[in-house]
Structures are given as C-alpha cells and as structure tokens.
Image (cartoon, coloured by chain):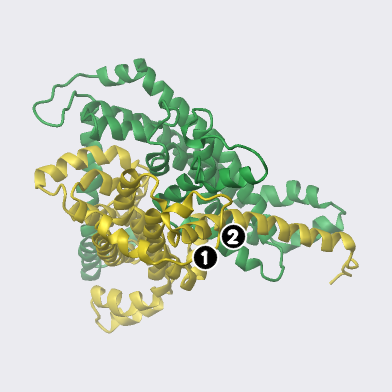
Amino acid sequence: MKGDKKRRNKGPLAREAQITGWLFISPMVLGFTLLLLFPMGLALYMSLTDWPLLGEHHFTGLDNYRGILADDLFWKVFGNTAYFTVGLVPLNIILALLLALLLSKKLPGIGLFRTAIFVPVMTSLIVWAIVWKYMFATDSGLINQMLQLIGIKGPAWLYDTKLAMPAVIVTSVLKNVGLNMVLFIAALQQVPRSLYEAAELDGAGKTRTFFNVTLPMITPTVFLTVVMTVIGSLKVFGQIYVMTQGGPSESTKVLVYYIWEKAFKLYDLGYASSAAFVLFFVVLALTLVQWQLRKRWVFNESD
Amino acid sequence: MKATSPPSLRKSLGNIGTYAALVLVSLVMLVPFLWMISTSFKEPQDIFKYPPRFIPKSFNFHNYVEVFDRIPFGSFYVNSVYIAFVVVIGTAFFASLAGYSFARIPFAGRNIVFLILLSAMMIPHEVTAIPMFLFMRELGWIDTHWPLVLLPIFGAGGVFGIFVMRQFFISIPKELEEAAMIDGCSRFRIYGQIMLPIAKPGIATLTIFTFVTNWNEFFDPLIFINTRSLMTLPLGLSLFTDEVGTAWHYLMSATVMATVPLLIVFFFAQRQFIEGVAMTGLKE
C-alpha cells in the first residue's frame, strides 16, 4: 500500500501505469461483472420472487425460503447431500493420505502407480459415471459377474434404495482420490528431512513419527483438502445425473439435482434460485471457516 | 550421516506390502478402462455372457463405425474440440494479460479488485446459472455455443487463470522489465515479448487445466444446448446413455473415443500436470 502511494507521485509514468493497468484487466473485469457479479445480484432478487420461465414475476419476499424449509423433498435432498458428503469425504481423505504415504517411499517403479491412480482424475466425470453404471449393472455388470464367480448373486446396485448411494459414493471416491493424493504428496515433500532425523534419534517409532511429526506439518493441506472436498461433494451432480437420475425413489436426489430440476424441468426459477442460495450460504460459511483457520496457522508459523 | 539400520526382513516385507497395496488400488482404477475397451470390441450377445472375458473372442471394430450412425458422434467431437480450443486460447490471453497487470503494474485499486475477483470464485456456478439462462435467452444465445465459450473464459475459470498467472509473474525478476522500460518499450510489448515467453510453464499449466475442465464440462451444455448437432461429448454421451439403455458395446466404443485423446495429452504432459495441480492447490 505504501509502495503504491510513492509510485503514484512519479508523474507521467505513474499515470501511464494507471491507464495500462486498468486497460489490461478491463476485459476480465467487464466479463466478470456481466457474467458473475450481475447474475449473482439478479439471482438474489429472483430468489425473492415467483419468477416463471415466461411472463411476469411478482415480489414475494421470503416466501420461497419459507417454502423450502417446509418442503419435505428439500429436507430429503439435503439429507441425501449430507449422506453423500459424510460418506465420501473421510473415505477420500484417508485413502488419499494412505496412498500419498505409500507413494512417498523411494521405491523403483513407484511413479507408474501414481499415474495409474491419477488417470481417473483426468477422465471425464460423465465417461467415468457411464463406465461405472455399466460396472454396477445387474446382469451384465462386471461386479456382479465377479460375485457370481464366487457364488454370490449380486444385487441390483443402482436400483436399490439402500445401495444406490453407496455405489455412487464409491464411484466418486475412485474418480477424485488421485487429486487429493497428489496434493498430499506435495505437502509431504515439504516436511523438512531434519524433523524425521530428529524423531528417529529420539527413538520415535513409525506410528509416533506420523502422528507427532508428519500429520502436524501437513495439517494446513489436510484441512484445505477437506474443505475443498466437502464443497465439491455438496455440489455433486454429473455422476448422479448419469447413474441414477436421483432414483430409486429419490434416494440419490441431491441438492444440485433438485435445483436443476426445479429450474430447468419445472421452470420455477424463483424457487430454484432460493434453493441455490441455500447452497451458496453453506459454501460461504465453509469458506469463511477455512480463511479464519488458515489465518491462525499462518500466524502460528511466523511466530 | 549416521549408520543405516541393517537391511531387515521387516523392511523388505514392508516394501512388498506397499507394492501389493498399490497394485490393488491401481487395478481398481484401471479395470474400468480395460473393461470399457474390451466391451467396445464385443458382439452384443457376448456382453451378457458369463463368465466375463477381458479379452474378447474376436476384435470387432464395427461398433466404432456403427456408433456414428446412432448418434452425431462426429459433431459432438468437433464441438468439444473447437470449444475447448477457443476457451483455452481465450483464457490464456485474457487471464495472463490481467495476471501480468495485477502482478506488475502499480495501479490504484488493484488489491481490492483482485480480492473481489478471488472471493467471487467461491460463488457456486449453480447460483449464477439460472439468471445466466435468462440473460442468454435475452441475447438469443440459447442453443448456441456463445455461453459455452464466454462463461468459462470470463467466469470462475478465468479468475482462476488470473490467479495462476499472477503468481507466476510475481516470481519473475523485475530487472528484465525495467531494462525494457528504459529502452522505451510499451507495456503491451513487454507483456507479449518478454513476460509471456518466460511464463511459458505457467501458461502450459493453465492450458492443461483449462482444457481438462472444459473438455469435461457438463452442467452448462446441459442447460444451454438442446439441438443434438450442437452438443459436446459429455452431454451427447449422457443423452446416448439414456437412449441405448444396455447397448453397452456402442456406449463403450463411444467412451473409448471420447477418453483416449485426453489420456494421450495426459501421458505427454503428465509431470507438468501433476506438479501444476500440486502447486496451484497448495499456494491457493
């Protein structure tokens, strides 16, 4: 800030900086204002109206929000989203961390495994979901055919209200675990060697070293990853759309599917906007928590 | 250096355990791909055959040909490729220009504008998609590729690009630029002829990121596109899934063709990509 002030008094060069600086960011700022900020404001207003696809809209105040809170389907959807998140996040984080620890060992050929586990991250979510829909297919699916080999008659995974969500969760964990794994590998590499040497000199075992040295050192990354994964889970859509279409009997209908259906199938745009804002508030709260905690960590590090 | 512990049985057992665990997980990751490829060559009647065969009895390429008759697969492909291409170029240009400005040009309000841009990144896309639909309808752009090109370049993807490029430009020594300025170079020339060439690794990371995100984008095409011939691969494939039901041999040949180019790109740019993910993820 101080630096800015000093430069500002430098005359023609500083004026040139003002103009060029703004000129260079102007396409982005203009696009951003039109395509993000303006829609954000309009969405907030729409959430307070009964906006239909065609025709006039009326201001209805908080009616939509009241409607949502009274909607049994919304709560079911909210519960499903929570189920998906609670099922996916611990599984994803723990598996990613375990894999990162294994892949941090200096063993020959280890890079191949890293590649293999990362490949699904690169694959289109829709393709991955289509392939897994096939894997879970009742008669022709590989999973049930393998089960048959050992004499078990496999269930109709995606058509069972109890099994559909776990199947979607497994599909999603396998899709994205490689991403968190890579973040953890990078974090593990940042832990100073000297700490491990000190721990070894102190006679700490592997488990103690992990919990007392490794884990505290990578906590910021773990936390960041958890928050990002939670936010991603709250927005799950594509795999649900492909694998179950929210069924059977709404057992996999999640928040974004509900929003999409309200907006683009039932054309209740006002109501859908308010449901979208519920999602926004949850994401906002999570992000703020993350910022607060990161500030604290940064402070501690510089102490 | 202190004495290393003697090569113990425990250690080699541990390594075997490590390999076993990694092989198992890698198999779970790769089997779906192998199964996908295998099915794409099978005759329809062999799909339901038990026990499952990974190596088909004979390799039939006709699924690959027939799938083009069932759906406008060629159009999906062309649409996906050219949209991704335009978005990548657009993002690389506008985001690096803005990123350079935020990193190096001291103009009034740059910190606050940057902060606003960054905080907008957490706005869920689903919130703005609904008004955007109305906006695009006003412009007559529903069922065109305009929203699919403009939204990623100037939306959250573009903001992410600015962030990545700013980080990159900040790390380049100032002296280079100052010398050029004394020589009377314009800022745009400094950006284009000095900074951009140095920032190639950053651009590469951003390009791969943008390409993958865009190639896989599903929600926007689902909302904005109705006409088949205008659909992108993910949308076209999801529609095809609903239509053909259990004609997995067609579906799998389509998914193979949709996946292979991306995997080829990945194997060539693997190192850059994985390290790029780690870098941007950690510095965020």
Residue B206's x, y, as percent? 39, 64
Vertical placement of A93 versus A274: above or below?
below
Q: Quadrant of the N terminus of chain A?
A: bottom left
Please tell me in which quadrant of the rendered image residue B3 appears: bottom right
In the drawing, does residue B274 fall left or right of residue A189?
A: left
Q: Amino acid at mark 1?
A: Glu
Q: Are marks 1 and 2 in contact (CB under 8 Å)?
A: yes
Q: Tell me what residue is drawn at x 78 percent, y 62 percent.
A: B15
Q: Is residue A261 visible?
A: yes
Chain identity of mark 1: B
Residue B95's x, y, as percent? 30, 62
Q: Tell me what residue is drawn at x 27 percent, y 45 percent.
A: B222
Which of the pair B204/B226 is nearer the observer? Answer: B226
Q: Estimate the spatial distance between the alpha carbons at disc 1 and disc 2, rounded to whole Å.
A: 8 Å
Residue A70's x, y, as percent? 35, 15
Residue furthest bottom as drawn:
B183
Disc number placed over residue B275 in the picture, else none: 1
The chain assigned the colour yellow in the figure is B
The chain assigned the colour green in the figure is A
Disc number placed over residue A200 in the picture, else none: none
Residue B244's x, y, as percent? 33, 47
In the drawing, does residue B53 fall left or right of residue B208?
A: right
Please tell me in which quadrant of the rendered image residue B108 appears: bottom left
Which of the pair A294/B82 is nearer the observer? Answer: B82
Q: Tell me what residue is drawn at x 54 percent, y 42 percent.
A: A170
- The residue under label 2 is A186
Chain identity of mark 2: A
Helix, strand or loop at label 1? It is helix
